[in-house]
Image (tube, rainbow, N blue to C red):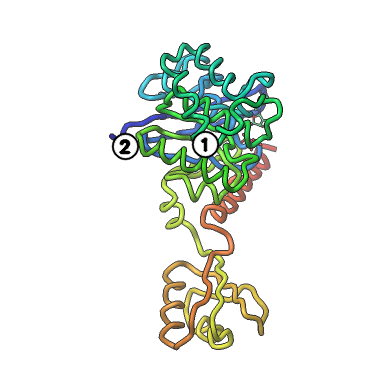
Amino acid sequence: MNTHRLAVRARGITKCFGEIVALDGVDLDVAQGQIHGLVGPNGAGKTTLLGLLLGLAVADTGRLEILGTPVRRALDAPEGVAGFVDGPGLYPWLTARQNLAALASLRGLGGAAARIDEALDEVGLADVADDRAQGFSLGMRQRLGLAAALLTRPRLLVLDEPSNGLDPVGKRLIHSVLSRLANGGAGVVLSSHRMDDVEALCHEVTILVTGRAVFSGPLSKLVSENGALDYRVVASDPPAARRIVADITGIGVVGGHDDGEVIVVSALVPALDELVVRLVHSGIAVRELAPVMSPLEAAFVALTAQQELALDRQTGAGR
Ligand code: ATP
């Protein structure tokens, strides 16, 4: 498997709907064998970008290559791309199995019929294979949509909010299906509002704000570029822990009750490391240490605020 080949290469992608600039010069690289998360506030352009990857629409300007092939027209996505935006298109009056059979025959997928049961099993729908899709919950419809995508043996899978409506077991199942696909060399691009899902699943992330990519790269880079984070600390001797915090440069108490068990500190990672070392050297046990907001969530909040401020300044200057 060559993880350096790109499933998606987008440069300077712009897409407008009348006056609305949905995408504003977006660059995106998704390597084969990787899961790439798109996050951003409502209306940031995630679904629009995913639609372009699926060939449902075409960019106004910019260059888009999917699986090494330039995309020039809508419905021009090369073979090997599967997925859905705005929920999967299903025939409600057909059963789960019939839906997949219809898709296999419509797409002329040779040999796919034999894989239908396997695909249903993979997404945990084997027990309801002969139930009509119209009675399916949102989570079940999402899973059936994923089974439909799996039938095509995609080399690029594009999913809009795949965890929507899924219970924890369903979510774990879908995560393992996506990870297996990526391990087999496929590129996966998904959007999500769930930062914990993105952190658990994705190798790389792009943060879109008002149509612009304000960050794109590995999650580790996002963490290292991040400023101080707030951490919850529970130590066996809270008053002594507070004294040690006060003695370390670059770390400060920002929350928790003065006489309470939980201390909330704000720190960069090196200062936090020093705190842990000094607590342990002083015979104080660290019972809990966790960021109040995950690094991705914190970066999301900070970058969104910065971008919105910059836009306000631009529009203010234009007035
Ligand atoms: P959400 O998180 O709410 O799903 P999103 O990041 O997916 O949002 P998009 O659906 O891509 O955002 O929308 C980006 C912008 O483009 C929004 O301002 C939206 O109103 C606009 N837009 C998207 N599709 C159309 C369309 N077909 N016609 C007009 N405007 C559209």
The percent position of residue 210, horizontal first and vertical second, equals 61, 38
Q: Which mark is residue 100?
A: none
In the image, 148 versus 83, the foreground residue is 148
The residue at which mark 2 appears reads as 3
Q: Find numbered disc 2 in the image and state the secondary structure of the residue it sits on.
A: loop
Lower sequence index among marks 1 and 2: 2
Q: In what quadrant of the picture does the C terminus appear? A: top right
In the image, 243 versus 166, the foreground residue is 166
The percent position of residue 154, horizontal first and vertical second, equals 43, 26
Q: Find numbered disc 1 in the image and state the secondary structure of the residue it sits on.
A: strand
In the image, 170 versus 72, the foreground residue is 170
**For this view, does 178 lie left or right of residue 134?**
left
Q: In what quadrant of the picture does the N terminus appear? A: top left
The residue at which mark 1 appears reads as 190
Total marks shown come to 2
Q: Quadrant of residue 254?
A: bottom right
The percent position of residue 104, horizontal first and vertical second, equals 50, 16
Answer few, some or many: residues within 10 Å of disc 2's Cα (few below 14, many 20 plus, some between 14 and 19).
some
Q: Quadrant of residue 243?
A: bottom right
User: Is the Cβ of the residue at disc 1 closer than 8 Å to that at disc 2?
Assistant: no
**Is the residue marked 2 within 8 Å of ligand 1, measured from its CB?**
no
The percent position of residue 142, horizontal first and vertical second, equals 60, 33
Ligand 1 image-quadrant field: top right
Q: CA distance from mark 1 to mark 2?
A: 18 Å
Residue drawn at x 65%, y 19% as measured from the top left: 94
**For this view, does 3 lie left or right of residue 265?**
left
Q: Identify whether 268 is placed above or below 67.
A: below
Residue drawn at x 41%, y 53% as measured from the top left: 220
Check disc 2 and give the amino acid type.
Thr
**Is the residue marked 1 within 8 Å of ligand 1, measured from its CB?**
no
Check disc 1 and give the amino acid type.
Leu
